[in-house]
């Protein structure tokens, strides 16, 4: 199978402020994005891929001169892959508030010349979708062949069908939910508390103090990582394996392999991710609830959608369980919308949407075959 090879990020500047759901505005601002494949003459083959919490615009391909720089969905997007860049023009956008190039807390606030830090405005899924729509406008694309996302990206795909219903032909909502459960909000809150109670947090203005709240970020990532894996996958990979031949009988030592793995993941995360960004993105997850404006009636909320839907869940995903995907499917069926649902038996938990599962990839490939037939790609 071919690969995309080296890709190059692009930056688009926006002078007009972006109105936010909070009542604040953001602007001027920049969005970093990447594109793969070729936009056809009719401009009908564009697919927007929305990223999840710790991902970015770098969906596929690699960066020249950088080892291990493969895009986060490279196994799914590229020449001959389920989302085939020989047929589709794929767009990945880094959302505002992130820490991977688009305007976020680590950037300078033009209003006062200081780093935004904790003063960066709260952003929501709906705000991200509106920012993405502006970029799509600039690219001269009236309607997207599809919007696709997993986890938080799936929420964005769903939101696209509600905020810009005429602009989306198909929506692929993968390992996602119509809103967060109380348990999910609780996990996010514990992670946020780990960050804000770190002595190096300084109310979110740690950059001004020349420090980073690494301890808080490490713990936050460890908490999150546990929720992305299933019990079965953790048991199979680590079980009760020890790091050393004998127990140290210490409350401070790293005794088990799973402890070592989690600390490694947390430490690595704290080296590249921004703490304020983590707070912002987990809040965006908490706030997403399209049914909230309809008295909790998801069917009423999805009535305005016009897209054709592919919803996918994974059996061992307890963070975004199949039950939550089925809620979306039921609401779509209630409205007579075109929807297909696939529940994949996979042992990997929430992370399954990022992994190589032939049944899952076959579902995605089949959907894009259908889309290609519709648009003549």
Image: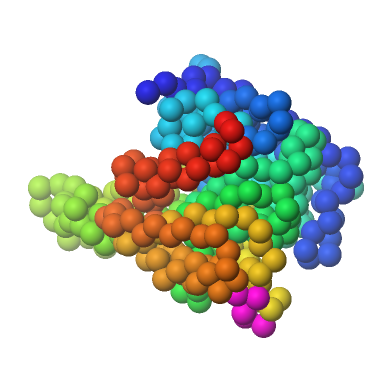
The colour scheme used to paint the residues is rainbow
Is 255 left, or right, of 326 in this rendering?
Answer: left
Q: Is residue 19 magenta?
A: no
Quadrant, the N terminus: top left
Q: Residue at x 57, y 22 (%)?
A: 7
Q: Does the magenta stretch include residue 299?
A: yes
Q: Which residue is drawn at 57% across and 68% down?
A: 336
Is 254 left, or right, of 37 in this rendering?
Answer: left
Q: Where is residue 236 in the image (x, y as percent from the top left)?
A: 19, 53
Is 130 left, or right, of 296 in this rendering?
Answer: right
Relative vertical location of residue 265 with respect to residue 219 in this rendering, above or below:
above
Q: Residue at x 60, y 45 (%)?
A: 146
Tell me if I can see residue 74 in this picture.
Answer: no
Closer to us: 138 or 366: 366
**Residue lying farthest to the bottom in this orientation:** 295
The quarter of the displayed image where residue 374 is located: top right
What are the residue bounds of the magenta stretch? 295-300
**Residue lying farthest to the left in this orientation:** 245
Q: Position of residue 264 (x, y in %)?
A: 36, 45
Q: Which residue is drawn at 40% across and 66% down?
A: 322
């Amino acid at each position: 199978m071919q690969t995309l090879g080296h890709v190059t990020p692009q930056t688009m500047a926006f002078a007009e402020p972006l109105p936010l759901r909070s009542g604040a505005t953001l602007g001027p601002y920049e969005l970093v994005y990447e594109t793969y494949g070729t936009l056809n003459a009719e401009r009908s083959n564009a697919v927007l891929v929305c990223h999840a919490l710790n991902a970015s615009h770098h969906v596929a391909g690699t960066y020249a001169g950088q080892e291990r720089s493969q895009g986060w969905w490279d196994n799914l997007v590229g020449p001959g892959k389920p989302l085939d860049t020989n047929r589709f023009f794929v767009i990945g956008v880094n959302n505002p508030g992130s820490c991977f190039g688009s305007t976020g807390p680590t950037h300078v606030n033009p209003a006062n010349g200081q780093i935004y830090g904790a003063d960066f405005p709260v952003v929501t899924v709906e705000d991200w979708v509106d920012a993405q729509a502006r970029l799509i406008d600039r690219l001269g694309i009236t309607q997207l062949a599809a919007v696709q996302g997993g986890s938080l990206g799936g929420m964005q795909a769903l939101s696209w069908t509600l905020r810009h219903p005429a602009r989306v032909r198909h929506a692929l909502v993968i390992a996602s939910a119509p809103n967060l459960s109380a348990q999910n909000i609780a996990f996010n809150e514990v992670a946020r508390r780990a960050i804000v109670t770190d002595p190096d947090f300084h109310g979110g203005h740690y950059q001004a103090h020349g420090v980073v709240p690494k301890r808080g970020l490490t713990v936050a990532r460890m908490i999150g990582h546990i929720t992305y894996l299933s019990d079965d996958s953790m048991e199979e990979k680590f079980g009760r394996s020890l790091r050393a031949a004998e127990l140290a009988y210490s409350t401070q030592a790293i005794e088990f392999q799973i402890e070592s793995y989690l600390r490694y993941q947390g430490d690595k995360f704290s080296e590249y991710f921004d703490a304020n960004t983590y707070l912002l993105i987990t809040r965006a997850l908490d706030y997403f609830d399209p049914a909230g404006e309809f008295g909790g009636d998801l069917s009423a909320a999805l009535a305005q959608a016009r897209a054709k839907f592919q919803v996918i869940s994974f059996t061992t995903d307890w963070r975004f369980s199949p039950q939550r995907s089925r809620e979306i499917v039921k609401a779509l069926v209630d409205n007579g919308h075109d929807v297909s649902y696939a529940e994949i038996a996979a042992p990997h938990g929430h992370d399954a949407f990022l992994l190589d599962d032939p049944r899952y990839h076959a579902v995605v490939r089949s959907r894009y075959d259908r889309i290609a037939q519709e648009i003549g790609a």
